[in-house]
Image: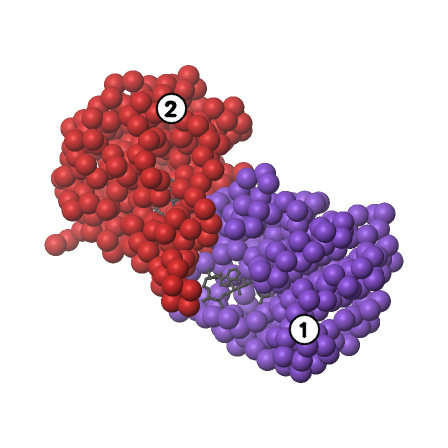
Amino acid sequence: MEPDLSVEISGIKMKNPVMTASGTFGPKEYLPFVELNRLGALVVKTVTLKSRPGNPPPRLRETPCGVLNSIGLQNPGVKVFIKEDLPWLSQFDVPIIVSVGGETVEEYLKIIEFLNETKEISAVELNISCPNVKKGGIFFGVDPDEAANLTVKAKKISRFPLWVKLSPNVTDISLIAKVVEESGADAVSLINTIVGMAVDVKTFKPYLGGITGGLSGPAIKPIAVRMVWEVAKRVKIPVIGMGGIMNAHDALEFFLVGAKAVAVGTANLVNPKAVLEIISGIKKYMKEKGFKRMGEIVGKIII
Amino acid sequence: MKKGDNLIFNLSVEVISNQMIASEVFKIKFFSKEIASVAKPGQFIHLKLDYEDILLRRPFSFYRAEKETFELLFQIVGKGTAFLSKLKPKEKVDVLGPLGNCFSLPNNISRILLVAGGIGIAPLRFLAEVAKKKGIESYLLYGTCSSNKIVDLADFKALTKEAFILTEDGSFGEKAMVTDLLQKFAHEVAPDYAYACGPRLMLKEVVKILISLNIKVEIALEEVLGCGLGVCHGCVCQTTKGYQTVCRDGPVFEGKSIIWE
Ligand SMILES: Cc1cc2nc3c(=O)[nH]c(=O)nc-3n(C[C@H](O)[C@H](O)[C@H](O)COP(=O)(O)OP(=O)(O)OC[C@H]3O[C@@H](n4cnc5c(N)ncnc54)[C@H](O)[C@@H]3O)c2cc1C
Ligand SMILES: Cc1cc2nc3c(=O)[nH]c(=O)nc-3n(C[C@H](O)[C@H](O)[C@H](O)COP(=O)(O)O)c2cc1C
Ligand code: FES
């Protein structure tokens, strides 16, 4: 019998526990390589209230086993997203999770109000962890009081389940997770990128136009696994794990420490078929080991 | 600028040959009917190099594409290109492409000027070949730092009406930089259109000179790339239309549209 990979997160039924991480997957551009209906869920690039041009280039720098990015939430704004992207996305049989970012609480709430008018989306993910914007973003993710305040208000008005994406740039991520859970979050996703920096010793200049950037990729995976483990022990809401997942084995580590689902980011930039290969890899592993349901591996780390 | 075909392949392709043709400069040939038959001058291919801790793909312009094969010209500058230089015939590489837009080569033109600095010759060779097939005459101004970096001279002479080669150290041809002689060369050639590829500072200067001569110029730009598909917004350059992606809106841009820092 085929193993059952389906999971349910905040009432959303997913065919499998693998989704795309915000900002790293373009549904239209990846269509030649990925049958979207096979994804667990699709988390779109963070949308903001107004369009954002993003940060000055260079925006990427490869570092050992990782990538530093300073994109700065370049996006056309929520209205354009709703008008131009959402109708196209809705033709697919895949839950659409809309990541939202803002500089102020009011901005986050206004975006949610716009999204409330739509029918096509399954959940809202509050991005309170983008390290590449001067105002807002990570500000809400590193202070428990700010995180709580925003989550309470967002939950109150959102028609959709509310996920909160956490920043690893904190002393105790499980504390923030606990606080947003108590404030009404329906799920937490982690981790966003880790703030980093790289300098060109030939020119004495930072490699990135934005000076610092967010580190992603295999380099951050051990940190991400540890953080998911800490958070999963402390909260009851579902935990979505991410950070450096390049293959099915990486994803399985996250399940074992308690992630109910995972998201794949940087791997998409390298291999457009990464998500699909990870889904088949998980299925193959479960078959080989005789597991029938995801519940048999989630949180089953033996310590 | 014409958009390239939307056909993009992600394939594992076989190396046919790989040889050093100048100091630290290699020419590598791959077998792929699919890619070779749709690649256009200016477009590039994104290579996944499974070596040590390399993560992102590495982009290379098409140097040449024929029925079943395509060639790249590359210079060793780091880990990825060093690894690429060691690939042997029959080994396979995961490639993604063709990507990006292409040089425009409008129909009503009869002579074009190609301006190449160093490894920037790569996309221009392919362009010269396609131009020749269309009956368009190319004039090449090609500069390298030294004679040991010059590639495929005989080939260029055959493809172009005139190939003017110079080196910064004077070890071959005139001792000069491309930008020193461009004004004079462009004036003499009086091309309908110009195309340039090379180091950023050179391109900036080339665009300035050609615009002052009222010659339209397209340039192929480089940036560090991520996805190569226009998704991550990691590869932008500043243009008169705002930030544009080098991988999808480019790599070919109208010279006058770039806002240089
Ligand atoms: C559209 C396009 C076409 C190109 N065509 C050619 C070509 O035909 N021949 C050729 O020799 N080179 C070409 N380049 C540059 C080539 O991609 C880089 O030299 C190569 O990626 C360096 O990799 P590395 O691992 O050897 O160097 P490393 O220094 O180890 O690379 C580190 C990082 O910097 C990036 N990088 C380094 N130098 C450059 C550069 N000049 N441009 C963009 N990214 C860079 C790498 O991709 C990588 O992410 C092109 C670049 C672009 C964007
Ligand atoms: C190029 C790039 C763009 C990103 N953009 C966003 C974004 O818009 N919103 C967001 O919440 N996270 C964004 N992220 C973070 C990823 O969603 C993910 O949390 C992080 O990269 C860790 O996962 P990974 O190592 O698999 O990439 C981005 C990451 C990268 C590399
Ligand atoms: S490399 Fe990702 S948008 Fe150009």
Residue located at (27% from left, 33% from top): A164
Q: Which residue is mark 1?
A: B176
Categorize mark 2 by other alpha carbons within 10 Å: few (<14), some (14-19), many (20+).
Answer: many
Does residue B209 appear left or right of residue A292 in this picture?
right
Q: Which residue is mark 2?
A: A111
For disc 1, the chain is B
Does residue A40 appear left or right of residue B1 in this picture?
left
Residue A41, x across and y down, in percent: 39, 36
Nearer to me, A237 or A138: A138
Q: Which mark is residue B64?
A: none
For disc 2, the chain is A
Q: CA distance from mark 2 to mark 1?
A: 57 Å
Secondary structure, mark 1, is loop
Residue A49, x across and y down, in percent: 41, 26
Q: Kindly tell me whether residue A122 is visible in this rendering.
A: yes
Residue A100, x across and y down, in percent: 36, 31
Residue located at (52% from left, 23% from top): A83
Residue located at (40% from left, 42% from top): A72
Does residue A178 appear left or right of residue A107 in this picture?
left
Chain B color in figure: purple
Nearer to me, B39 or B12: B39
Q: Which chain is red?
A: A
Secondary structure, mark 2, is helix
Residue B179, x across and y down, in percent: 67, 64
Does residue A99 appear left or right of residue B228 in this picture?
left
Quarter of the N terminus of chain B within the rendering: top right
Give the amino acid at mark 1: Ala
- Hey, which quadrant is residue A48 in on the image? top left
Q: How many marks?
A: 2
